[in-house]
Image (spheres, coloured by chain):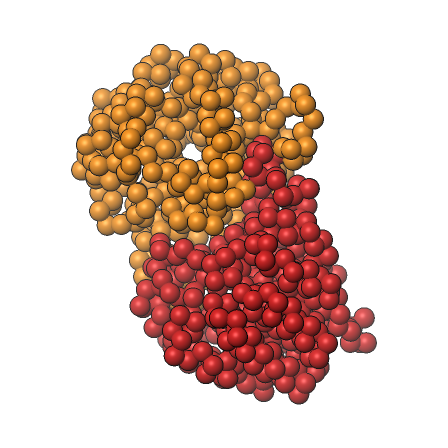
Amino acid sequence: MLFKCLPEGAPIPGRFPGPVHARDKWFTIDIHCHVRNEKATQLVEGNEQVSRWFLETQASPQSRAINRANGERTNEQSVSPERRIADMDRMGIDIQAISPAPRQTYYGADPDLGLATARAINDFIADICARYPDRFVGLGTVPFQAPELAVAELDRLHKSLGFRGIEIMTHVAGEDLSAERFRKIFARCEELGLLVFMHPDGFTEARRLAQHYFTNVIGNPLDSTVALHHLIFGGVLRDYPNLKLVVAHGGGFLPAYSGRIDHAASARPDCCEQISRMPTTYLKRVYFDALVYTHHQLEYLVEEYGADHILMGTDYPADMGEINPLGMIETCPGLDDAERKAIFGGNAARLLNLEMPRRLR
Amino acid sequence: MLFKCLPPGAPIPGRFPGPAHARGKWFTVDIHCHVLTPKAAEMAAGNAGATRHPREIYANERTREVNRQQAERNRIQFTSVENRLADMDLMGIDIQAISPSPNQTYYGADPDLGIATARVINDNLAEIAAGHPDRFVPLGTVPFQAPDLAIAELDRLHKSLGFRGIEIATNVGGEDLSAERFRKIFAHIEELGLLIFMHPTGFPEARRFADHYLVNVIGNPLDTTVAVHHLIFGGVLDDYPNLKLVLSHGGGYLPAYSGRIDHAASARPDACEQIHRMPTTYLKRLYFDTIVYTHHQLEYLVRQYGADHVMMGTDYPADMGEVDPIGFIERAKGLDDAERRAILGRNAARLLNIEIPVAADRATP
């Protein structure tokens, strides 16, 4: 039902927490959920270029007003682990793999500020995980714009903070991830066995996306799509075949539109210069969250990529999120229970090197 | 196999004509195939507004070189009627719904040049069709940038030239199709019952698409995607519910990624202002060609939208085309023959008011 048609008092889609689910039926890990850190916000205050939310820079004033209201509404959920645990308990989610709010990755900051904010956020996430180690695992952030500093922070995340993965954006202040200078970061992620959760922050050229919240509706899956094309065609996935890459929102547009990249690579010499295999060979190594809203899309992803490549995710606490992830996957007719188990938590546990609880092995 | 790995002498994908298929087994209409009108190209040459193509501007030098080579190679297929008929005969295609080469919509030209080139192109298509009325159905072009001139040309197409449809691009010199000033064109198209075949001309802001031919690989399905979002959310499909709109390349990204638009419209007040139904309600009224290269994508489209909404297309003679459309559809295991018949020609016949020859009706594959 359209938002404007919802009757008074009706539950509003995208408002967490969703319907109640008991925790003991499945082992569940939410791979896609964000926290916000006050200290990092303060560090960038006054620096308009860095602190603005890139995704909404082209959005209409109306959309930005709604985003502001949403931000206020979800503030507690974004910053308070206790509130999150209450919501997780209600929704049946055992573990959240918490990542920074995308706007707080600050890839546009100068290197020092980028590192400072990354450290503040990572320490904040580490603290939450330390307080509730059975409910949270940390996905950190590193300042991609300064690869040497990023690699150093990766080492700190891995050795000192025990993080199993990081979140990355789909471009680095407008520069694509396949640029030569970022290679060392991917090399280190692969070397350390870190999971890389790729999340968009809107599309870089969003002139036509101002209306209808297109900056997010189109912009987010679009930027993931562009990034994935660059990671494939630019040879990053070829060079780092063991990279554990998880892409948000079902991977964006590409996973359900994969024929074109193979055709291009076989029909055109300018399309296969930096790859050694067909493009979909690389695409099939990638993992996707289940945040696609419909069973037909989820079933299609499972058919094409295998249930072991799909990870449950909610986008908690944002309004484009899936507030009933357990219900959505439970009621998906094209899945069997083994596939559900894998999607609910088995795959994430494997990629994050987490031990499954004894009762559910 | 990667292009660079093809052994010498191996058939190269995207090179028309494709494998041979006898005509007569199916009734076949190719909804997606282009004609180049050299005279219009000469008129537009040197005019920056008319010839500003993002796919050329942003592409790296390697891509531009490959495009030049392709253009030389397939120019005869773009321009020679005899050659086209020979290819159609070989591939088993009964009818081509010929449309202008997308760059020739010239929406960036000033109105006078826009209408002049449109007339020349439409006259050329009309002439080709008049020479072989049992093989060609023309889809014309109108200068969207000048709505009143566009409407006048629509009338000429419909009344004088007997056209059943037009081709439109996915943006008008960078402006979206949902802009208020274009509404009268859609109103008139709906009124006249013309089919609209929408074909992209790349994405205008293609800075990140310079390499790997992404100006086309992403740019084309992307611009279709953005255009369809605007037609839905901007209320065009709500205002004109009887529009017969066919989208290229399987409709771009949206048809297989439709959950998000419904979620947005139910979760956000700014995502439902100009619509009265859920976004996918409008999406399901549209038609999609079959240029998706894989059976899993084709079968997904048929499952979601119905075989009566999917139409065979090749993109003849371009290298991102499907050179074996009949084989591709024949081999799709998830389809039955009734669905194949609909996709191969009957849907197009219905939308374009083409009479199916009696013999074709009797053929049972």
Residue A65's x, y, as percent? 34, 73
Quadrant housing residue B39: top left
Query: Residue at 27% across / 41% down in the picture?
Result: B186
Towards the viewer: B143 or B24: B143
Residue A178, x across and y down, in percent: 58, 53
What residue is at 36 percent from the left and 28 percent from the top? B100
Answer with the quarter of the image where residue B116 lies.
top left
Which chain's colour is orange? B
Determine if residue A97 is in view. Answer: no
Chain represented in red: A
Please identify the quadrant where the C terminus of chain B is shown.
Answer: top right
Quadrant occupied by the N terminus of chain B: top right
* Rendered residue at 35%/55% (across/down): A207
Q: Foreground: A291 or B84?
A: B84
Could you tell whether B227 is left or right of B157 in the image? right
Where residue B275 sits: x, y (%)?
Answer: 33, 57
Which image quadrant for residue B148? top left
Q: Is residue B268 above or below residue A92?
A: above
Tell which of A255 and A233 is nearer to you: A233
Judge whether B235 appears above or below B11 on screen. below
Q: Residue at x 25, y 44 (%)?
A: B182
Decide if residue B172 is in sight here: yes
Give how far across and how far down residue B121 sits, in percent: 30, 24
**Does B61 sit left or right of A358 as displayed?**
left
Asked if residue A328 is positioned above or below residue B333 in the image, the reply reads below
Is residue B301 or residue A136 the one in the foreground? A136
